[in-house]
Image (spheres, rainbow, N blue to C red):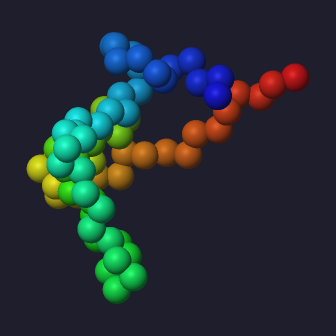
Amino acid sequence: MGLPDRGTIKVGQWADAVLFDPASVRERSTYVEPHALAEGFDLVLVNGVVARENGRLQETHAGMLIKPAATE
């Protein structure tokens, strides 16, 4: 997508990462509760900020809209 500061974990890069056990991932949403969070995601980092930890959403809003670099 032409995003030079993403895709690797190192100093100066934006850290988007998910720590999970594939064997424990399970969808919980239903038609009655469409916003129920999936299980099995231990840690989610968005721009280096913890967004979800131990199955609970944090009160952070570190995400941002990203656009691909213009191509000619």
Q: Position of residue 7 (x, y in %)?
A: 46, 21
Give the residue at the far bottom of this rendering.
32
Q: Position of residue 70 (x, y in %)?
A: 77, 28
Q: Is residue 10 left or right of residue 22?
A: right
**Image quarter (top left, top right, bottom left or bottom right) of the C terminus:** top right
The residue nearer to you, when weighing 2 against 28, is 28
Q: Position of residue 47 (x, y in %)?
A: 37, 35
The residue nearer to you, when weighing 64 against 43, is 43
Q: Quadrant of residue 35?
A: bottom left
Q: Number of callouts in the render?
A: 0
Give the residue at the far right of this rendering.
72
Residue 19 appears in the rendering: yes
Q: Is residue 16 left or right of residue 39?
A: right
**Image quarter (top left, top right, bottom left or bottom right) of the N terminus:** top right
Q: Position of residue 43 (x, y in %)?
A: 20, 41
Instruction: Give the answer, above or below, for where 9 lies relative to 39.
Output: above
Give the residue at the far top of this rendering.
11
Seen at 35% across and 18% down, the residue is 9
Q: Is residue 2 left or right of residue 15?
A: right
Residue 43 appears in the rendering: no
Q: Quadrant of residue 59?
A: bottom left
Seen at 25% across and 57% down, the residue is 26
Q: Quadrant of residue 17?
A: top left
Give the residue at the far front of this rendering.
23
The residue nearer to you, when weighing 11 against 23, is 23
Instruction: Give the answer, above or below, for where 48 lies relative to 6.
Output: below
Seen at 50% across and 20% down, the residue is 5
Instruction: Give the answer, above or below, for where 46 lies relative to 32.
Output: above
Seen at 57% across and 18% down, the residue is 4
